[in-house]
Image: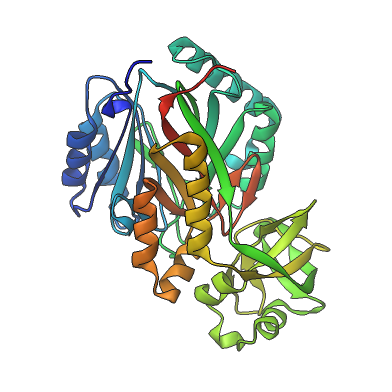
Amino acid sequence: MNAIPPSAVVTAFSDARDERLAAGELAAKLRHDHLGCVLFFCSIDYRLDRLAGALAEAFGDLPLCGCTSAGEITSRGYDSGTIVAIGFDRRFFSVGARLIERLDGFSLADAQQLTDSLLCECRAASVARVDADNTFVLTLLDGLSVNEELVLATLNSALGSITSLGGSAGDDYRLSGTYVYSDGAFHSNAAMVLMINSALDFEVFSFHHLRPATVKLVVTAADAERRVVQELNAEPAAEAYARLVGVPVAELDDVVFARYPLAVRINNDYYARSIQRVNDDLSLSFYCAVENGIVLTAMHTGSILDELDQTLSDIEERLGPAWVTLGCDCGLRRQEIEADGTVDQASALLRRHSVVGFNTYGEQFNGMHINQTMTGVAIGRRQRSRR
C-alpha cells in the first residue's frame, strides 16, 4: 500500500484580527497542488462581510464552506477569536457541498434532490466507491433558526444508511446572529450540507458525559415553535428548575445550565435538552426541541475529561492514529470545563487526539439535534479497506 502524503488532510488557524491577513495566513498554510476543498470555523468577532471577501480573494475558485462558532478548537486546543480550517486533498476526498437557503421550507423532495446531486458529484470525482461505508455527511446549520429538527429529520430520510453528523453555528453567546458560509458570503436561516467520500479510513462518533438521576420534570406548558417552556410540573419553569438544582432563579446562568442539564429518554438513551436562557416571565428557552407533555430527566455530569480521553483513545485503537479528528463540541461542555478550571487539561487532550473544530449551539447525529455532546469524525492515516 502506498504511503499517504502529509497533504491528505491539512489543518491551519489564524488569530490575526485583520480579515485579509487571517485569510492570507490560512491560504499560505493550506494551499498545495492537490487541495480540493476547505472547511472552516470562525469567531463572530470578525467583520463577516470583510472576511467573506478576503477568503474569496485568498482561495479563488476553490470550494470553501464554514460557519461562525461559539469558540474554536485549534492546534492549541480550546481557542477563541480565531479562524480554523481543514484542507482536504482531492486525491483522497471527494466533497460535494450544497446550501439550503430557507430552512423553514425544506421538504422531503428538496432533501431527495439535494442528496441525489451530492451523490452524483462525489461519484464523478471517484476517489472511492460511493456508499455508506466510504461516505459521511456533515451538516452546519444556523444555530438560532429553531428549524434544525425539521431539516435534519427530513434530510436523514433521504440519506438512508449514510451517516450524518454536524453542529449548529454559534456567536459566542450573544444570541443575536449565527451564520453559515457558502459561495463567497455568510448566510442566516440557512444550512450547509457536505457529502464527503473518502479513500481513507474514518469513524463517526457522538458521546457525552451525562448520567440520569431519578428526578423527572414534565413540560406542562410550552411554545414548541420558539422552543420555550413556560411551565414544568405546572409551575413557572425557571422556578421549578431552580428548585431542582438548588440555585436561586436570579443565579441561573450558563454554568448552572451546563452542570445541571435536562434530557429526554429515547429508547434506552438520554439526549440533552439544554437550557439557553431564563426569560423575564420565568419561562425557559431551550437550544433543542421541547413540547407539551415530554418528560425531562434531571442529569448529573460524570468526568468530562475522562470521557473525552477514553472515547477518542478507543477510536484510535480501532482506527490507528488520526490525521485529524473533526469535533463539533457543545459550547456548554466548554463552559463547564472553564468553570471547573480545567481548560489547560482539556486542551492538552484535544491536542493529543488531533481534534480541530468548533463549539456549537447544538450537535447533529443521524438526523437528531442534540446538546451537550461532542460529535465528530476521526480520519485515519490508512487507506479504507473495501467491504
| Count of numbered circles on the image | 0
Q: Nearer the viewer, residue 241 or 200?
A: 200
Q: Is residue 158 visible?
A: yes
The residue shown at (64%, 33%) is 155
Quarter-of-image position of residue 49:
top left
Report the colour scheme: rainbow
Quarter-of-image position of residue 180:
top left
The residue shown at (32%, 50%) is 74
Quarter holding the N terminus?
Answer: top left
Does residue 350 appear to the left or right of 159 in the view shown? left
The residue shown at (38%, 53%) is 350
Please say if 214 is above or below 269: below
Quarter holding the C terminus?
Answer: top right
Whole-percent x, y for residue 181 in the image: 40, 39
Q: Nearer the viewer, residue 319 or 40?
A: 319
Whole-percent x, y for residue 142 in the image: 51, 48
Q: Is residue 189 visible?
A: no
Please say if 306 is above or below 155: below
Does residue 328 appear to the left or right of 35 in the view shown? right
- Residue farthest to the front, as pictured: 317
Please say if 268 is above or below 126: below
Quarter-of-image position of residue 276:
bottom right
